[in-house]
Image (cartoon, helix red, strand yellow):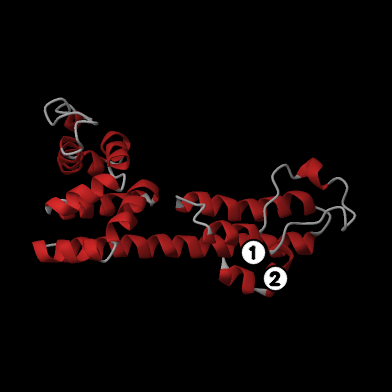
């Protein structure tokens, strides 16, 4: 958002619109959920967003509100806003690609027990869990595969469970792509469940999961 806010064209989106001061009494008739980039930045700073998609949806809401209220009376403003929206989607897509590449790189690096420990110590597990939950379909698969590799280390396995990996891995095993439904992902879920203190059942009680 900092890069977006630095752009001269974004200056109208930096703060909540004072519709009374601007003489726009009908603003809230059209815009039911106001949003601005300044509010998004504050939410980022306070760790309000637990998913990338939640952040992206708030930024999209900024553009959607502007387009809704200003079309078709202000075509120039409408055109500029639409271009900002497209620019954001391009940057978001580039970020998702970088996340996928990072997950692949971590998976390739996790071939030895020492590298598994080093990757976990560098703080990669929370990133991978979030990516498994909120990434692109390919990003989710890469993240799940890396978590599976890291979980061969007992300490990592505990951290992976505590980081909340079970729920996104279950979703992947049940509803993911064909690759996510294969035994590797199911095995990861079963293994994590079996070590979660019984909260998610034993390996035996989860034995049917690989059929999804």
Q: Residue at x 25, y 43 (%)?
A: 180
Residue farthest toward the right in the current orientation of the protein:
23
> Contact (CB < 8 A) between labels 1 and 2?
yes
Q: Is residue 6 above or below residue 14?
A: below
Q: Which residue is mark 2?
A: 9
Q: Is residue 4 above or below residue 193?
A: below
Residue 202 image offset from top left, x and y in percent:
15, 29
Q: Secondary structure at mark 1?
A: helix
Q: Residue at x 74, y 65 (%)?
A: 12
Count residues near mark 1 (Cα–Cα under 10 Å), then give few for <14, some for 14-19, many for 20+.
some
Task: Tell me if residue 193 can be seen.
Answer: yes
Question: Who is closer to the viewer here, 14 or 57?
Answer: 14
Q: Label 1 vs label 2: CA separation? A: 10 Å
Task: Tell me if residue 71 can be seen.
Answer: no
Q: What is the tally of numbered marks visible in this picture?
A: 2
Answer left or right for 144 relative to 23: left
Answer left or right for 89 relative to 184: right
Q: Residue at x 23, y 44 (%)?
A: 179
Count residues near mark 2 (Cα–Cα under 10 Å), then give few for <14, some for 14-19, many for 20+.
some
Q: Which mark is residue 83?
A: 1
Q: Secondary structure at mark 2?
A: helix
Q: Which numbered disc flags the more N-terminal residue, 1 or 2?
A: 2
Residue 74 image offset from top left, x and y in percent:
81, 59
């Amino acid at each position: 958002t900092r890069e977006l806010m630095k752009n001269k064209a974004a200056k109208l989106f930096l703060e909540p619109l004072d519709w009374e001061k601007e003489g726009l009494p009908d603003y809230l008739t059209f815009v039911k959920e106001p949003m601005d980039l300044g509010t998004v930045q504050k939410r980022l700073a306070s760790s309000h967003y637990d998913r990338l998609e939640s952040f992206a949806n708030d930024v999209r809401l900024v553009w959607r509100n502007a387009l809704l209220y200003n079309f078709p009376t202000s075509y120039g403003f409408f055109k500029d806003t639409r271009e900002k929206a497209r620019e954001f989607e391009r940057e978001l897509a580039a970020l998702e690609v970088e996340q996928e590449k990072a997950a692949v790189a971590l998976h390739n690096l996790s071939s030895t027990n020492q590298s598994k420990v080093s990757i976990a110590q560098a703080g990669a597990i929370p990133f991978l869990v979030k990516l498994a939950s909120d990434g692109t379909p390919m990003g989710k698969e890469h993240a799940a595969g890396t978590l599976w590799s890291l979980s061969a280390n007992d300490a990592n396995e505990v951290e992976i469970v505590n980081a909340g990996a079970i729920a996104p891995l279950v979703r992947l095993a049940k509803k993911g792509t064909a690759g996510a439904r294969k035994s590797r992902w199911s095995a990861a879920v079963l293994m994590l469940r079996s070590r979660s203190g019984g909260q998610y059942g034993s390996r035996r009680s989860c034995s049917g999961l690989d059929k999804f």
